[in-house]
Image: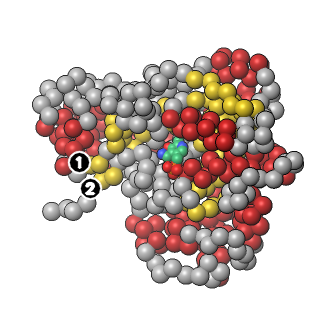
Amino acid sequence: MKDRKILMIPGPIEFTPAMMREMEKPTTSHIAPDFMEQFGQALERMREVFLCPDGQPFVIAGSGTLAMDLAGANLVEPGDAALVINTGYFGDRFGALLERYGAEVHHVRAPVGDVPALEDVEQALRVRRYKLVTITQVDTSTGVLADVEETARLARETDALVIVDGVCSVAGEELRMTDWGVDFALTASQKAIGVPPGLALAVAGPRAMQVWRERKTPVPNFYADFSNWLPIMEAYEARTASYFGTPAVNLVAALSVSLGQILAEGMEARFARHRKLSAACKAAIEALGMQQLPAVGKAANTMTTPRYPAGVDASVLGKISAAGVILAGGLHPACKAEYFRIGHMGPNNASDILATVGAIETGLAGVGYQFVHGSGLMAAQQVLLQ
Ligand code: PMP
């Protein structure tokens, strides 16, 4: 009997065996030559994955929220105006974080499951001059995908810094930092990047680094201060060692392997694979008679958020888990009992999607939901075979 379930939540995700083998190696010194090479390589690969050839990568022990903190601590000064393009729980978090650093924060919101209209963003940008604009590319609470390219274009017309929370998107959703004018993008290791939780990752473009250099006030956060980390990142890239805080040695080594695998697949192929697996999952959900939380055309490719059908509640997740697939419940406070979340990002393949849909059918049958058995699987397979 297989003793392991498939983890199909929106982070942490299923990991590759090669990355896990790297994790399991004995921990070396953080100044060992091999480790300097791995760290340096990881930093170089970050630029390629974020599609930001002239960006400054940061890899720091911490979770994705620390990566958000890097943006707040280094780019905000008291009284700065910040506009949050809010698509859910993580937009709220970014707003609260920026306020903590003294920003005057304004949110452009949409109904839960939707994205603010570009006209509303444009209107907000006309009312006052914002120093920075934040966009959550995929809000993991709702599974909604924001239009980073167009929003960034509008924001850059006003000269605002564009910051993207890509925790649930980088290395899965299409994100082109340089081409789209994104000044700072951040993520965490445990999602499409494909490494266990524990690393905060960010790439700062030249305009963001300039804003940090021209600060009038000191960075009011010791651990997150670029002044402490920039020399470390530069040293490792030059394959020399330097110390501020002990790096998460095994995680950084694993990151280098995972980023190498991502680049071996190629970013375009990776974006396309995520789109296809997502389409297959969503086709299955529809065939099984379930609605989705995101408005039409606004759903992410890294995750799917089905609404429970009539007569079904979160107890179905236990049955799906018993069938071998772990899914997540709802997260948005306004409606968390009404939907569940399926993550499909990173190394997931067609078989993972079919296994997930099969387990969802088993779970639904187990709670007495009426549907044509196999209809979800057939719909998914039809997309996968295209
Ligand atoms: N932003 C988004 C979009 C997220 O999905 C998450 C985590 N689910 C975070 C930020 C925070 O990341 P972490 O939990 O690693 O601190």
Which comes before the other along the chain, label 2 or label 1? 2
Res 233 visible: yes
Q: Are marks 2 and 1 in contact (CB under 8 Å)?
A: yes
Residue 57 has which mark?
A: none
Q: What residue sits 41% from the left and 37% below the top?
A: 331
Quadrant in which the N terminus is drawn: bottom left
Q: In front here: 46 or 117?
A: 117
The picture places residue 7, in percent across and down from the top left corner, at 33, 52
Residue for badge 2: 5
Q: Position of residue 298 (x, y in %)?
A: 49, 26
Figure colour scheme? secondary structure
Question: Relative to 247, does residue 327 appear above or below in the rendering?
Answer: above
Question: For this rendering, which residue is in front, 10 or 92?
Answer: 92
Q: In the displayed structure, does residue 359 sit left or right of residue 226? A: left
Q: Quadrant of the C terminus?
A: top left
Describe the element under mark 2 as helix, strand or loop: loop
Q: Residue at x 29, y 48 (%)?
A: 326
Please determine whether, in this image, residue 309 is positioned above or below residue 204. above
Residue 321's disc number: 1
Q: Residue at x 72, y 36 (%)?
A: 103
* Residue type (three-letter) at the residue carrying disc 2: Lys
Q: Mark 1 is on which residue type?
A: Ser
Cα–Cα span, label 2 and label 1 = 7 Å
